[in-house]
Amino acid sequence: MRPEKITLNYLDLNLLTIESARNAVQERQITATALAESFFRKIQSEDGNIHAYLELSKDRALAQAARMDALADKGELLPPLAGVPLAIKDVMVTRGVRTTAGSKILSNFVPAYDCTAVARLEQAGAVLLGKTNCDEFAMGSSNENSAFGTVCNPRDLSRVPGGSSGGSAAAVAAGNAVAALGSDTGGSIRQPAAFCGVVGLMPTYGRVSRYGLIAFASSLDHIGPITRTVKDAALLLRIIAGRDVMDSTSAEVPVSDYTQEIGRPVKGLRLGVPREYFGEGLDPEVGALVQTAIQSLAQKCGCEIVPVSLPHTEYAIPAYYLIATAEASSNLARYDGVRYGFRAAEAGTLAEMYRRTRDQGFGAEVKRRIMLGTYALSAGYYDAYYLKAQKVRTLLARDFDQAFQNVDAIVTPTSPTPAFKLGEKADDPLAMYLADIFTVVADLVGIPGISVPCGQSREGLPVGLQVLGKHFDEGTILRVAHAYEHARAAS
Amino acid sequence: MVTTPESSVQALARYEPVIGLEVHVQLLTATKIFCSCSTKFGDPPNTNVCPVCLGWPGALPVLNRKAVEYATLAAMALNCRINEQSIFARKNYFYPDLPKGYQISQYDKPLAEHGYIEIPGNGGRKKIGITRVHLEEDAGKSLHEGFADSRDSTYLDLNRCGVPLIEIVSEPDIATPGEAFDYLTRLKEIILYTGVSDCNMEEGSLRCDANVSVRPKGQEKFGTKTEVKNVNSFRFIKQALEYEIERQVELIQSGGRVEQETRLFNAAEGKTYGMRSKEHAHDYRYFPEPDLLPLVVDEKWEEAVRRQIPELPEARRARMVSEYGITAYDAGVLTASRALADQFEEAARAAKNPKRVANLVQGELMGRLKSKGLEIEQSPISMKGVAFSADLVEAGTISGKIVKDLYDLAFERGQDFPAIYEKEKPQQITDTGAIEKIIDEILAANPKQVEQYRAGKTTVKGFFVGQVMKASKGQANPQMVNELLDKKLGS
């Protein structure tokens, strides 16, 4: 029998984890439908100030919730995400649900197919609440580049939530979704997770299929979870990871049960601390909080702290902005107004249609990156820019290979500063690019990284600790992050 | 001394052309190169399309193994070396029938290199080098005509988007338009034999662009080349090259300079016209396709493909000349397609005497086809029909004279040989008395042979059979003739 009255008193939506939400539905303390509806109500009343959502997918959510309830009514064992309300960054295509990538050029685009990661979540029973705001085509570190308005950081509405997955991080931090998917090309999962005080995991390149992820920079794009707890990140990763025949770059590497792995002790694990990440440009408060976290890992969790060096770190930002923009210049060529999306009305010739469509359809940052990338690939400049950047990438990979011969994981700050003020860096692209300085390297090298909250600044702003791991060793970084999360909670 | 202006013929004789050809061949795979859409020609517009070949946001290419197999097979038949690793690259340009804004092709690491084709030359053979064979996807079709609003609109049919192509690039080894024609004829023949394409120029499954320049004889440095496009038959390629060479020589003779440009051939006028070169001054900004892994052809697989290479036309012709004693010319006609040659050989081998099949083809079939202006594929008499007639002659059932008459009838009525034979077959003489009478006459007229036979030279019997059949105009029942002869000669 279905519960007659829905009593949410003991289910605080702000504290729900994936497991608690799913168990509440399984044990029929609440129906999936009621859970979804209460989230929609909460979003309705709270998201106006935050603007984390661009589109709500109520029909799809309620249909899925009804399916889960029907299963629960029959007393069946529910799948691992049954009834769990999740949010999806608007760079992942969703069948029948408008998908914009935060861009005017896709303002009217309703895809006919689902992103693999989204489909896998739904197959596992998840309820998709809606699509979250982001920087246009995931290009940005503050979410201020969205064509549909900025997102405010729920911890301080005058500040940015980080980017580009700002909407996903803000929705989770505000309790307007239990968890979310984001995408990370230069730090876009980890940096907003740090800014909003939640957990953000970027898996190894190839771990999660990119099919249906609107491409920014194909060799750097990753899908990953943004959650309230490390365990939730482990749970979501297990669902979305694994080979997909629709993505040639998805790897044939077996997927572990990460929720089991996080329980294993971390005592004796060797954690590298790269000196290049604790120098100039690092906010002293952030530095102190991260150092405290590292000490806690050593003293409370029994990890061994080992100084390491990643000597080519300083070249990461320029290499990143050459490779990412080069690939973007090509990936964004398809938005030409011919077949779908926005088309400028008043054009007399084909060339004019292209020019006006792209001029009016793309925002300033996207155009800046298309220009940069086009230049980097041009005849006569290719060797000096794109090719050299690829060589830097190889050197960076070598740095990590060497470091990982001695250590099991590497710990660093996620971002050099806490969340900055809205508008503070909006007119200074270079300052904005430096917000990614600690995150881009993992994208370039293809290794996994997680950001876990490690305290607050005096102003009450969250700070993140980043744990980087070896290729396909998400298990270890989740373990370290989980151990730290618990050590911190205990203190 | 009075000098007369040099005639154009004399001028032409002082220059030598340098020609290189780029041939695109569509592969006969059932599905497209990067998705599972059908490659069928002639289906209603935009019916064989999906998110991948439409370039929808988030869609990714997955390489078709069969396309690689076919391309490899063709490259091997063209004597190329297969590269163990080749790389797909993006060729970036904007055009409405190119949905992604880039074509996935191969650039600096193609599938195969260093091949050649042999063509007839200076009494012997000449090798034309093949620089490379690479895989790529076809674009769609822009339909500029045939609609009510064609004056100001263009329609798109994207069925062809993603159909697999190989591009075969020759070395600039071709010295005359005639050699270009020979090269193309051989190339088409070889590809047809491998079965990887139907090389149908009308349907666009074989397309050819020509690069041509001229230089004074003896000069090593190449002249400035032009690229001739839009030529849809081998004969037109020859014509276009002849025109273009003359044009370039005249231009240089009159003090002008050849401009590097793309020129379109107008078949009706037999002339080439320059396109405004600015329109095609592309910088394609090639870079490695990040959505696909490097293509690795391992040794084992390469061997498996190599075993599929059929006997190629050149070798087959040589063997047929020696095996069946036919002329080189007829061998050429019979090997015009692999199917025809297969039919011929199948018929010949099934017949009692393969040479007799060859003799009938050469002696009776070819001449009639020629005088009727028919291609061998249009012949009323099939190879099976020829074999059938050959067996009748071999058995002595019908004479050579009757075969000629029946062939005439077959051509007259457009019916195959067995049908004609059924209807027109001469009434057999089965009357013992009548046959005995003929035998007696023959034996009486050839006493010397009778003596030889009786002396033990039994092979002479064949002579008597022939004579009896001849005397009966082929109408005597051969079995009875044999039996009665044995009886009479034995007595």
Image: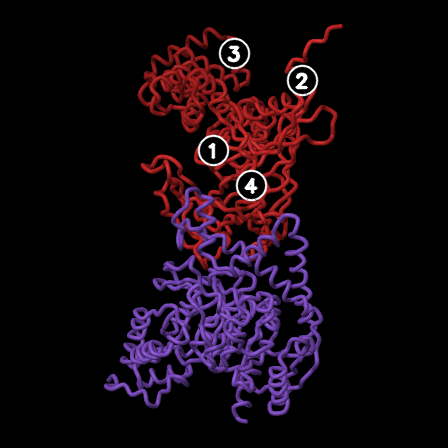
Q: Nearer the viewer, mark 4 or mark 2?
A: 2
N-terminal-most mark, 2 or 3: 2
Q: Residue at image x 53%, y 89%?
A: A486
Chain identifier for the purple-coloured part of the image: A
Q: Earlier in the sequence, mark 1 or mark 2?
A: 2
A58 lies left or right of B457: left
Q: Colour of chain B?
A: red
Q: Which mark sits nearer the N-terminus, 1 or 3?
A: 1
The answer to which of A462 and A304 lies nearer the viewer is A462
Residue A6 % position (x, y): 27, 85
Residue receiving disc 3: B449
Q: Which residue is mark 4?
A: B167
Q: Chain of mark 3?
A: B
Same chain for marks 2 and 3? yes
Q: At label 1, which amino acid type do we have?
A: Met
Of A335 and B185, nearer the camera is A335
x and y, in percent, of residue B428 in the image: 34, 18
Q: Which quarter shows the N terminus of chain B?
A: top right
Return the residue at label 1: B201
- Left or right for A298, reference B404: right
Q: Which chain letter matches label 4?
A: B
Give me the C-alpha separation between circle 4 and circle 3.
68 Å
Residue B277 lies, in percent from the top left, at: 56, 35
Task: Provide the residue designation for mark 2.
Answer: B11
> What's the image's color scheme?
by chain
**Real-space Cα distance between discs 1 and 2?**
34 Å
Residue type highlighted by circle 2: Ala
Task: Tell me if mark 3 has few (under 14), some (14-19) or many (20+) residues whose alpha carbon lies within 10 angstroms of its own.
Answer: some
**Chain to which mark 1 belongs:** B
